[in-house]
Image (spheres, rainbow, N blue to C red):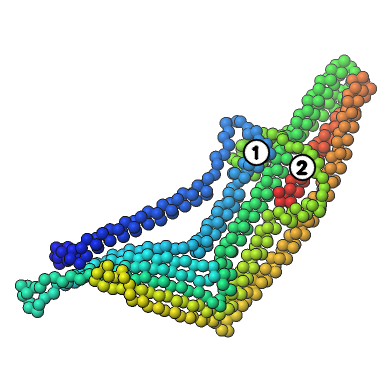
Amino acid sequence: MNRKHLRISGEKAGGDLLPAFSFGLVRCCLALLCVFLGANLGVCAKSEREVGNRPVPLAQSPGEALHLSLQDCVNIALRENLGLLNQKDSLLSVKSQLIIEKNKFEPNLNTAFASSVYNSHLVQDYENFASLSLAQRHKYGGSFSLTSSLDWIDHTSDYYTGSQSTSDLASPGFKSQFTSSLQFSVSQQLLKGAFWRAATAPLREAKFDVAIARMDLQDQILDLSLSVKQAFYALLKSQEYVAEMGSALAKSKEDVKIARLRLTEGLSSRLDYARAELALVNRQRDLATAKKGFQSAVDNLVEIMGLKIGTKVQPVSDIRRKRVPIHIEQWVETALYQRPDLKAIRAQLDKNKVAEESAKNNTLPTLEAQGSVTMSETDDRLRQTLDVTDRVWQFSLKFEHTFFDVSDSERWVQSRIASRQLARTLEDTKRQVEVSIRELARQLKRLSDDIDALKLAEKIASEQLELSRLSYKEGLINNRDLIAAENDYTVARIDHIRATYDYLSTVAKLDRTLGR
């Protein structure tokens, strides 16, 4: 096959119109491809930023402790806790599915370009095809599409005149053929689907999935905040225990010095000195136990926050220790309105109703109407094919129903049962929430009364200790009574500290129960 023949024939058939048209079509396709790739790369980059945007943990010099308030600990936990990060990724995944479902109802623009070559001994065909289509689904269960296409073929042939001699080879033949078409098609379901309910069921279910995932994330945030608060209060309590045991140890050391001096002066017996030494040993043991409890509380808080194990933390107390007025009915109303788990159950119940509608829809027969009109033209001149005159109309009705198959109806029954079960779960959860609130209210009342009583007991023990010290200095009592008074004060002080932080932990539980 002679390439020169192809070039000359192409100039005769199309002139300058065909190369210009082909070049313009190629430029359009390349532009659309660049826009598509840019949009996808932008979405991927955005998703990478959203998923991988994890702040850097707080810097810490070797041996330096982090001085953190309660709010600092909560913020770090919300940022570093691995379980919470996984829940956030799950929410992003569900949102991505929602975007996919929404995109199904967006206009879909599709372009295609193809080129092929057919080569044999006497024939060589170049075929080029380009199309542009626009498709759209709507919420009433139908769809329409508009497609425009252009197909052109360059046909070149070498043929003989009948003689076997090569001298009888005739001139090559060339022919171009252009075909353009424009098609508009519509389809609509008439019986099946109750129109928009079935068509939009996946989209509505995806929206409910996002709401459920968001409520699950909020519920996990509340659980994590409660754990951080309880661990922080336990750390503060251990810190005050250490301080109190350290103060008691200092007093015991002073008692040992006084007992040694009195023994030297002959004002007390060796039994008093031994009693003071034993009290000192007990205080040292209590202080060591308190320090171990403090370190355990630090490790627990660090683990909950998601920091590196072994990180040193020094709590900064910014707690406002005020009493909470008790309003049980108001608390119950607030909890039933704003608890994330109750909202998630309600969203799941609404999602089940959508599934129930879809299951009921599947029991109906299918009646679908389809119509289309196609306008096309074929000619050996490109300009002539653009004036389409050939029109083909088509309309069809499709009816489909399966008899003696109970699977769809049984799925409908199952979805209705699932909805009833979920409704009972919602009511049971409401009852449990109300019971929890009433129990927490009783605990707050009891702890409030205990704090008042222990505060008074601490004051009395402090006054008794001062009186015992004065009596001991004047020789009216021995150190046994003094050590007993010191023990009574230490116990009263420890009980007051424990009741105070138990009250704060109960308030934190109440906030979690109320969903705030």
Q: Position of residue 189 (x, y in %)?
A: 52, 75
In-front residue for pair 392/383: 383
Q: Is residue 224 above or below residue 497?
A: below
Q: Determine the secondary structure under disc 1.
A: helix
Amino acid carrying mark 2 in the image: Leu
Q: Residue at x 46, y 73 (%)?
A: 186
Q: Badge 1 local density, few (<14 within 10 Å), some, or many (20+)? A: few
Residue 118 shows up from this direction: no
Q: Residue at x 59, y 60 (%)?
A: 207
Q: Position of residue 319 (x, y in %)?
A: 74, 37
- The residue singled out by tag 1 in the image is 72
Q: Residue at x 79, y 56 (%)?
A: 435
Q: How many marks?
A: 2
In-front residue for pair 231/356: 356
Residue 98 got which mark? none
Quarter-wise, where is residue 75 in the image?
top right
Residue that lies at the very extreme toward the right in this rendered image: 476
- The residue singled out by tag 2 in the image is 504
Quarter-wise, where is residue 316 in the image?
top right
Residue 446 shows up from this direction: yes
Q: Is residue 156 left or right of residue 371?
A: left
